[in-house]
Image (cartoon, helix red, strand yellow):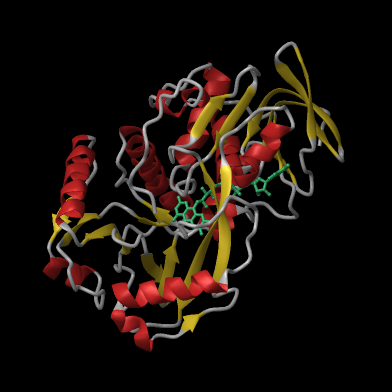
Amino acid sequence: MKSKYDVVVIGAGCIGASVAAHLGELGCNNVLVLEKEKMIGTGSTAKCAGGVRAQFSTPVNIHMSHYSIQEFEKLDKEFGIQFVQCGYLFVVKTEEQKNRYLKNMEMQKSYGVDVRFVTKDEIAKLAPNYGLDNVLGGTFGPKDGLIDPYMLVDCYFKKSRKMNIEFETEAPCTGFKSSDGKVTHVVTPKGEIACDYVVNAAGPFAQTIGNMLDLKIPIEPLRRMITTTGDLDFITDKFPMVVDVTSGMYMHKEGNGLLIGLANSDEKPGFDESIDNNFLDTMLMTALEVMPYLENAEIKTKYPGTWAGLYETTPDHHSILGQVPPYKNFLLAGGFSGHGLMHAPAAGRAIAELVVKGKCEFMDIHPLRFARFAENDLVHEKNVI
Ligand SMILES: Cc1cc2nc3c(=O)[nH]c(=O)nc-3n(C[C@H](O)[C@H](O)[C@H](O)COP(=O)(O)OP(=O)(O)OC[C@H]3O[C@@H](n4cnc5c(N)ncnc54)[C@H](O)[C@@H]3O)c2cc1C
């Protein structure tokens, strides 16, 4: 670790690693990524379900996904990040849901997303044994799918290291020094590091990092749980990510079984990552409602078959990308609200362009600016899982 870098990135999850690799690609390789843990990629990224989709309700999230999916296709060819385009299937059960998802679908199509409405019979073929009671159909995006979060971090790490970008583990950022509206140093137990730019990519800890500069960053950690089943003989690589719009329960292939996730709407912000057994019961009851076939399945109710991790949630369920006033050189890439893995390529490129070119050229990230909260100019993402 040197005493001066052009850019210090705080956090080596999928976002920090993507920012680093994209900076290197733009010719900025005097970069240090600080990670508080012993290993990179062990935060929210490691807890994530791996889902990738373009089926969102706002243009900016669709653009973030659209760009990222194209990147995943390339990275898969080059690094084998295990991008499986099995599709996302949102299953609707009421006329209101159907109309809402049809409307979303038309908007998504207008931005070039490959998505179509599927009937109950098609759902039976796409997702064998999924419960079809009251099902009216669904929207299916065949280019959506799954990636391996570890492989993505590893691929950005390898790309970065090839460009001599440094990663320092067991190196928490504990504070900053600033002067004249600029952060001048990042403070760590291993020493103070002078830098031209700082990128806060600390995931659910983004607010904690902001507090060190007396900034109020509206990103809250929220526990989310996942459980998995034993082997199921009907599961193939083509089994899509299926989302029950009514309950929000999602399931996709994991090994030879299923991974099942559900958000607890009563969860309070906090850093608790323990398994909540009461809510696990709710998850299992819901799973039986959406897929009664699971009555006979083995459910792995203990860690590592069941686990909890943290979403980094903003009030409008959109990420925050870019400068955080009043500091001219303090950038934030956080608050992905459950979409950080799938948006890592676009987020990394956006931050790298802001640093190197002074503006983000490849897409319009204005809706994701930090100032939207103070300006009360929020557009809410409705398609949140
Ligand atoms: C159960 C669950 C399911 C999910 N499913 C999906 C999904 O299907 N698709 C999807 O796109 N997203 C999903 N997500 C969200 C996704 O995991 C996150 O949005 C994404 O991983 C955020 O990446 P990150 O790099 O910002 O955060 P992290 O991976 O948490 O990385 C931040 C890093 O910063 C480090 N750090 C924190 N503080 C400091 C400090 N002071 N100094 C140095 N380092 C520090 C942490 O140790 C950590 O390694 C899911 C999340 C959960 C919990």
The correct choice, above or below, for 75 with respect to 300 in the image is above
Residue at horizontal 48 percent and vertical 25 percent from the top: 369
Whether residue 106 is visible, yes or no, is yes
List x then y, in percent, for residue 247: 34, 62
Image quarter for residue 171? top right
Whether residue 254 is visible, yes or no, is no
List x then y, in percent, for residue 190: 87, 40
Quadrant of the rendering where the C terminus is positioned = bottom left
Q: Nearer the viewer, residue 341 or 337?
A: 337
124 relative to 149 in the view: left or right:
left
Q: Nearer the viewer, residue 14 or 284?
A: 284
Image quarter for residue 377? top left
List x then y, in percent, for residue 55: 29, 47
List x then y, in percent, for residue 129: 25, 78
Residue at horizontal 54 percent and vertical 75 percent from the top: 305
Q: Nearer the viewer, residue 329 or 194?
A: 329
Q: Residue furthest front?
A: 266
Residue at horizontal 16 percent and vertical 61 percent from the top: 137
339 relative to 62 in the view: left or right:
right
Residue at horizontal 74 percent and vertical 32 percent from the top: 212
Q: Residue furthest top?
A: 180
The correct choice, above or below, for 296 with respect to 376 in the image is below
47 relative to 139 in the view: left or right:
right
The correct choice, above or below, for 115 with respect to 277 in the image is above
Quadrant of the rendering where the N terminus is positioned = top right
117 relative to 232 in the view: left or right:
left
Question: Total marks drawn?
Answer: 0
